[in-house]
Amino acid sequence: MIRTVNLKKLYTTDEVETTALNNVNLEIKEGEFVSIMGPSGCGKSTLLNLLGLLDNPSEGEYYFMDEQVSQYSERKRALVRKGSIGFVFQSFNLIDELTVFENVELPLLYLGVSSSERKKRVEEVLEQMQIMARRNHFPQQLSGGQQQRVAVARAVVARPKVILADEPTGNLDSKHGDEVMDLLSQLNEAGTTIVMVTHSPAYAERGQRIVHLFDGHVVTENIKEKFHV
Amino acid sequence: MIKNYFKVALRNLIRHKSFSLINIAGLAVGMALCLMILVYIRYELSYDRFHKDADDIYRVILENNFFEHSDSLFLNIAPLPLAEAMKEDFPEISAVAQFGDEGQSLIRYQDKALFDNRVFYVEPSFFDVFSFPFLAGNPEVLEKPYRAVITRKTAQKIFGDDNPIGKSVRYGSVFDLEISGILDDIPINSHMNFDFLVSMETRRDYWHENVTGGGMISLRGVGDWGILSGKTYFKLRKDCDFNAFEKKFQSWIDGKYTEVKFMKFILQPMTDIHLQGRGGFELENNSDLRYVIFVSVMALLILVISIFNYMNLSTARSTSRMKEVGVRKILGAKRFGLIRQFLGESIFLTLFTLLLSVALVELGLPYFNDLVGIELDFNPLADVYQMSVLIGLALVVGLLAGVYPALFISSYKALDIMSGNPVGVNRKPSFFRNGLVLSQNVIAIGLIICTAVVYQQLTFIGGKDKGYETKNIIAVPARGFRMSKDLSSFTEKLLNHPGILDITRSLTYPFEEGGGATHIWYEGMNASDPTPFFVWTKVDYNFLDFYNIELLEGRNFSRDFPSDSKNAYLLNEAALKALGWETAVGKNFGICERDKGKVIGVIKDFHFNSLHESVQPLAVKLSSNELYSMSIKVEPDNLSNTLEYIRNTWKECSVVPFNYFMFEDRIAEMYRSEQNLKTIFTYTTIIALFLACLGLLGLASYTAERRTREIGIRKVFGATVTSLSLMLSRQYTKWVLLANMVAWPLAYYGMNRWLETYSYRIQLSWYIFVLSGAVALLIAVLTVAFQSIKSALTNPVEVLRHE
């Protein structure tokens, strides 16, 4: 599903060149739950951005669903992104002016899904995330955990092949963090591929595999036999 | 998706209430003012367009250059045979109208006697050129003598609800007229206004002469073509090219005037008359194209300021919508979609604002009408033009105001936004925003300077010594006395009243263009010399004393010299200059050959015409006849009592109704265009300043919000409230200072050019510039100071806790 070959990302400011990622080779199969760990500044988020097609690598190849996408234009990347990839952020990134329902509905709008179908699917996923009762609330009226559940709902509503989660529990207390992790595990069990960046070893353990990054390199991969067939 | 955009737009407006308020209020006020000015401009441009084929109608005017040293004298008058000859010789012409303006005339009906009836003598062909629709009757009724057509308003005034057709009225005390037709009322945007149209046949039959009425000038040695009388208008056929026709006309008319070299014929489109009318014997006081251009520019500037405000505030605020843009981009929004979203939002807001500004116009128009003294109508629902202007305005403003924020917001990469610190997010637009703030201030300061200069100049013109007394004078047109002894007894009785100081009479008032222009005769003139024109008038003995007109040389008219009543003349300075005379007293002079006499004195120039033009040569003659213009000088206290006394005395002595006006009011009326301009300028500048301040206020609060963290950190490390307030205020005041540097030379250049168009003008003084800059700076400081102090007072703990 995801395969990178010698992926490299350089950031160049006026005079300094920083290597954020160096020769990253990674393969993620369909249905896998992979956790990415490492100290601050090791390139976790950069890797996730590349995997999520938010950015292009400086060098190397990136195969997404067997397609070489590393040099796609912004326009083409946007096309691949919508529908195939769902995002969950540490800071939720909900649109403050839209209600819970409308926030979750947004990806379907961009996919051109019909109004009745949208309603059905949004309600389904809100039900699944247990926030149906809050459907007409605005993000500011919700707790952090609830907001993140809305964000997860938004990430899955378009039924993407893969969900990329960037420290989804970073802004949450342990109770809410657990709830969100349970949601992600459930989704994975239902077949969705999940790539998650986290600082928490406990939550990383939920994945079948933990990739450790240090200074832009993959240092270890702990493969755990936890496939659910 | 549109619904989604709409929801977000609306909720954004509500969430940022103060921001939205500033944005919408600024734009609404700007658009409302712009709309009002557009309505005004349209009114000014609409003059005479109600005539069918208005663009094909022209008039003939004369430009006379008798004297090398004087400005040309324009006369709205034409040779008597011109109309007939043009009709015969030019197949390009479809109709010609020749008519005479008799001015206000006395009309009696039963026991009513009404003075304020403007009478024109016309041929039936008048209606081939002009479109004044008949409510009853038709043009043919004017083929017969002693027939008249009146307007609906006049019919109402004289006959009330009775049917006027077939009824007779008495014209002065000379003949009866049968009312044979009724016209619809004349639109207010007409350069000609009349109450009575009397058939030209009446004049021919009664006076046994062919002249059109309304004054006459005769030139020597040109036969019938030397008789200048009446106005000549004509209509060209649709397929005729005016320029070609004009060339043909000029060579044709040159053939008629081989002898006369000083006279030039000008063909002027009728639709130009109101804004580009020229001097002498106009049918109405005209406006001025310069003023229309002026207010158009002002409307545009106001609109520019409001659009800049909008762009500025939207761009500033756009950073708070970065997250939304980022999320949308990640979810697959394309850049074009985002541009469409933000442009749409801008247009939506403009349309909403438009409704508000329409309401403002509805509320404000009556005041605006009061200010400029005309009746403007604003009803976009019933007026396609106004409706399309409205929608066009909203679209243009919405697009202009939204395009930069839309391009700017949509240009960031999703990743940059989501990483929390987009590269250059704050740098580029702040350069752009500062540019906008600078331009706004340049406009505002420029407007303050221009207003100050225009105000000074127009006040100068309005208050300039016109060369004669204007204060505390009641003017009473003194016609309608049966016997001259009635008039004497009237004046005697008046002078007995303690509130009445003096009375004089003359043929015309000093602010009128004399009794007409007439050709003169003077010492040393050769038979082959052109016959030059002078404006002339007839006066009473005390005319100079009454009006405080200064005598420069010689003596005034005096009862000690009985010959004065026959052949003595006073000339003004302009007359001497025109004749090239050093001194005039004792020289032979006459306003025509049979009126030959001697010049007994020279008077200082006084402005009997508008101050836009220089003073023309004037000859003054003593008379006891035809002194219809009576002026009464009164004590300013108890004016109403004095007026009541005059009214009652008039009733005892005269059979016609009393009619009067205050001298100063009439003069103010002559400068109404200037007064209007002054008013419009002042209000526009106040609004421009208000808008510019609103923009500054919005930006200041935005900056303060964005810099709260910086302010917190500075405070932790020891910054005082004063130093922080100064730091925040300085950011904007520096742009105001810079704006001065740009605005001064621009305003200086523009105002100098404008002043050059006046014969009498003020000098530009440096203090206007410095003061205008200071005012703008002061207002800017006051505007941002409040916000700056407020943010400087914030508790740093509050701010930094959120980090």
Image: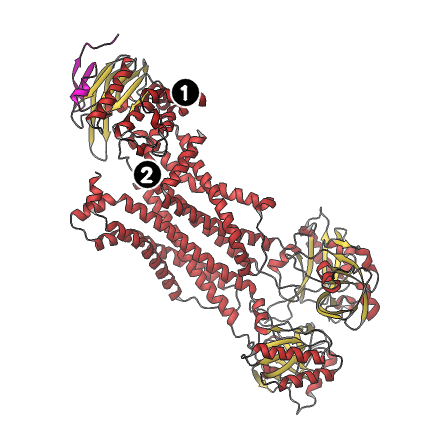
Read off the chain for label 2: B
Q: Residue furthest top?
A: A229
Instruction: Indicate the secondary structure of the residue bearing disc 2.
Output: helix
Q: Residue at x 70, y 88 (%)?
A: B563
Q: Residue at x 71, y 76 (%)?
A: B479
Left or right of B354 in this view: B521: right
The amino acid beneath tag 2 is Thr
Above or below — where is B593 with respect to B139?
below
Q: Which residues are magenta?
A: A199-228
- Magenta segment includes A211: yes
**Which numbered disc covers residue A120?**
1
Position above or below: B322 against B88: above
**Mark number displayed over residue B707:** none
Task: Name the residue nearer the viewer: B363 or A39.
Answer: B363
The x and y percentages for residue B39 are 56, 52
Label 1 vs label 2, nearer the camera: 1
Which of the 4 image quarters holds residue B510?
bottom right
Q: Position of residue B748 (x, y in %)?
A: 42, 60
Specify the quadrant of the image occupied by residue B543: bottom right
Q: Residues within 10 Å of mark 2 (few under 14, many from 20)?
A: some
Mark 1 touches mark 2? (CB < 8 Å) = no
Q: Does residue B450 appear in this view?
A: yes
Q: In what quadrant of the picture does the N terminus of chain B appear?
A: top left
Local SS, label 1: helix
Q: Foreground residue, B204 or B796?
A: B796
Residue B726 appears at what percent x and percent y? 25, 54
The three-letter code of the residue at mark 1 reads Lys
Q: Position of residue B653 (x, y in %)?
A: 71, 80
Magenta stretch contains residue A121: no
Q: Which mark is residue B319?
A: 2
Quadrant in the picture for the C terminus of chain B: top left
Quote the CA–CA distance across marks 1 and 2.
34 Å
